[in-house]
């Protein structure tokens, strides 16, 4: 067997099952994938330079479809760190490409229907049942299909036909805005949970923590996604391999960037970083939404599709929605799915679509690209009525459902559905967080510190504003006397200081809700870390930030104003200022969680703060307040 040959190729596996190297590659990849559980798998060594699994410990290696299935063995102690040694020179040429999946799967989706969830179905109280389909837009309608390993499938169609919704539905993740119905099958096994553990969804809009460099981003995800079964040296070796194979060496030390605030990578480079992030766990299914979106250079867009094609050739299933593809891009797809008004009007090889459209009465022009012809025919003309568009789509759907491609697809789907079961192995694949809680907290706090240090507004601007306010307060209220007019001035200074301390934590809330919320939500859903662990790390970072900013402001203006000249008085004032910041932060976070929108959260926060300052004693004498208002003081 050649060194770089795909170890999971069916012909090579059946022809060389006695070859020790073939067994090593197949088993080591399976161990590397499934060895992240708490109990691990049994691994024995036959030679010092290469790690081999014991053959007798893994009976029934192959399933009926030719894919290796490893049996779990709990009778041995865990030795998962020796599953695969990335640093071993003997293994460097055998582990293959980082785009190669640890195992192959077949993916089937049957009668996927997606409905839009209206606001009355999402509200907390008095919401309607999701089974009430009245006045709900039907986005996808009975979409079915089968995808095999090694296939790159393009999802085409005009704008609004349901391409993005279809890609999102294959992840199996519950969403607030859509109601997904239908069945998903992985290797003839029905999946009741989300497919996040054996698939990777790459959205059209790449979401990153923009203040990190490319290598720091990959290291963060590698340390958390691979867990503690691998040594740090092995994880760093994997990061270097990913950077090298995906040609990220030139941008590895560059900051990813924040649009509109921090200059960083181009759209094409951000897409490649997304693919590199997916290569860390090397899932067998890759779901991409508009991988060429925002890339205006045709050659660069074709380069991104080339990477997806390479990943498919290594054994992955790659499905990607794409708008206005060129003929060169279409030629790289093994199959295409054409959607119109939520219906599948074609699923098969691209060269066979022209005959179907011609037989339906929509011939392709010889002077136009076939893809342009399909999209032009399916797009709704400006002066077209709903009846005309519906008739066109109905004609194409009926023609497709009478074609050989449709009957072949339905035969495969019904055959899979007839014998599908939900097995414990599939449920285990939907699995647990791989890294320990301490590792999660350490990595999250390290990333947050880098974000604070590198963000030009988060640290530098906020520090400059606090220093400027401190000196202005000191100048305006310079050395006040503790009698008469001076006491009134000191009350005014304390009121302004209270306002400043209330406003210090607000930027952290705006950053979380407007910039990083999509990243955090995606990482939590993807199992990178636990939600409450992120909250703990953010809470600790906020404590440090509020402690530093409140102390800096108070250190400048406390002595200039002439407040109580003692260390005890200064530290007591610092504690009060810090607690004020924390209370304001807590109120803003509660408002943000309740509303989910930054603008609404700030309105609630501002109303609460203004009312508390008004009755706090700076403007009204507490003795003049009614008894029921004193309760809120």
Image (spheres, rainbow, N blue to C red):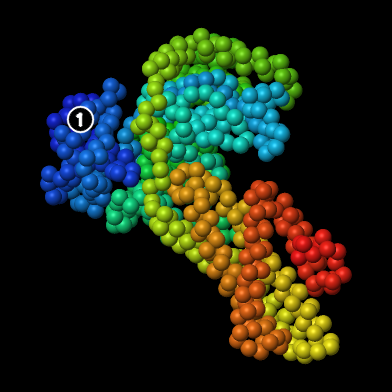
Give the crowd class for mark 1: few <14, some 14-19, many >=20 residues within 10 Å: few
Foreground of the two, 539 or 313 = 539
Farthest residue to the front: give it: 627
Location of residue 607 (image quadrant): bottom right
Location of residue 574 (image quadrant): bottom right
Foreground of the two, 208 or 337 = 208
Percent coordinates x, y for residue 198 in the rendering: 40, 36
Q: Is residue 265 above or below residue 503?
A: above
Q: Viewed as shown, does residue 400 lie left or right of 30?
A: right
Q: Which residue sits at x=16%, y=35%?
A: 55
In this orientation, does residue 227 appear?
A: yes
Q: Quadrant of the N terminus?
A: top left
Percent coordinates x, y for residue 444 in the rendering: 47, 58
Percent coordinates x, y for residue 381 in the rendering: 69, 24
Q: Which residue sits at x=18%, y=35%?
A: 57
Q: Is residue 39 above or below residue 106?
A: below
In this orientation, does residue 21 appear?
A: no
Percent coordinates x, y for residue 271 in the rendering: 48, 45
Farthest residue to the left: give it: 47
Foreground of the two, 51 or 134 = 134
Q: Which residue sits at x=48%, y=54%?
A: 533
């Amino acid at each position: 067997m050649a060194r770089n040959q795909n170890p999971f190729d069916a012909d090579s596996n059946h022809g060389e099952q006695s070859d020790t190297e073939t067994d090593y590659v197949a088993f080591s990849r399976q161990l590397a994938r499934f060895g992240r559980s708490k109990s691990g798998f049994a691994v024995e060594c036959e030679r010092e330079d290469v790690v081999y699994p014991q053959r007798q410990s893994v009976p029934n290696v192959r399933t009926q479809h030719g894919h290796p299935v490893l049996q779990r063995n709990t009778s041995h102690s865990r030795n998962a760190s020796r599953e695969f040694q990335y640093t071993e020179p003997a293994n460097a040429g055998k582990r293959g490409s980082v785009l190669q999946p640890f195992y192959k799967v077949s993916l089937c989706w049957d009668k996927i229907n997606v409905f839009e969830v209206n606001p009355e179905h999402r509200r907390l109280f008095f919401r309607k049942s999701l089974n009430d389909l009245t006045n709900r837009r039907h986005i996808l309608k009975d979409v079915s299909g089968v995808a095999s390993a090694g296939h790159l499938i393009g999802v085409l169609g005009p704008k609004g036909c349901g391409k993005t919704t279809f890609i999102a539905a294959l992840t199996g993740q519950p969403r607030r805005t859509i109601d997904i119905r239908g069945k998903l099958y992985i290797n003839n096994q029905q999946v009741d949970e989300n497919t996040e553990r054996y698939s990777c969804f790459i959205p059209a809009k790449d979401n990153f923590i923009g203040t990190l460099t490319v290598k720091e981003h990959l290291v963060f995800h590698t340390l958390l996604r691979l867990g503690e079964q691998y040594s740090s040296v092995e994880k760093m070796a994997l990061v270097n391999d990913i950077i090298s194979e995906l040609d990220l060496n030139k941008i590895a030390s560059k900051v990813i960037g924040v649009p509109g605030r921090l200059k960083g990578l181009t759209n094409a480079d951000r897409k490649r970083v997304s693919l590199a992030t997916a290569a860390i766990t090397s899932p067998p299914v890759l779901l991409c939404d508009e991988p060429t979106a925002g890339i205006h250079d045709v050659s660069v867009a074709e380069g991104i599709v080339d990477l997806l094609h390479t990943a498919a050739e290594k054994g992955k299933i790659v499905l990607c929605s794409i708008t206005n593809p060129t003929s060169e891009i279409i030629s790289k797809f093994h199959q295409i799915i054409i959607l119109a008004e939520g219906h599948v009007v074609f699923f098969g090889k691209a060269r066979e679509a022209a005959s179907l459209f011609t037989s339906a009465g929509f011939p392709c022009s010889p002077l136009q690209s076939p893809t342009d012809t399909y999209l032009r025919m399916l797009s709704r003309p400006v002066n077209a009525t709903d009846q005309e568009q519906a008739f066109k789509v109905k004609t194409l759907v009926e023609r497709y459902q009478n074609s050989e491609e449709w009957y072949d697809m339905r035969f495969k789907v019904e055959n899979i559905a007839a014998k599908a079961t939900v097995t414990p192995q599939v449920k285990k694949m939907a699995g647990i967080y791989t890294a320990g809680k301490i590792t999660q907290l350490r990595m999250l706090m390290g990333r947050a510190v880098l974000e604070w240090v590198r963000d030009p507004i988060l640290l530098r601007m906020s520090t400059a504003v606090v220093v400027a306010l401190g000196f202005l307060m000191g100048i305006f209220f310079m050395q006040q006397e503790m009698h008469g007019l001076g006491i009134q001035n000191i009350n005014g200074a304390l009121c302004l200081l209270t306002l400043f301390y209330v406003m210090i934590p607000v930027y952290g809330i705006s950053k979380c809700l407007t910039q990083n919320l999509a990243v955090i939500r995606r990482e939590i859903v993807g199992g990178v870390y636990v939600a409450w662990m992120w909250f703990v790390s953010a809470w600790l970072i906020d404590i440090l930030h509020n402690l530093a900013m409140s102390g800096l402001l108070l250190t400048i203006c406390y002595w200039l104003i002439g407040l109580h000249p003692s260390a005890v008085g200064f530290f007591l004032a610092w504690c009060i200022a810090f607690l004020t910041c924390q209370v304001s932060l807590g109120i803003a976070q509660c408002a943000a969680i309740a509303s989910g929108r930054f603008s609404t959260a700030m309105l609630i926060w501002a109303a609460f703060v203004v009312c508390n300052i008004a009755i706090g004693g700076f403007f009204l004498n507490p003795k003049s307040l009614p008894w029921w208002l004193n309760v809120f003081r």
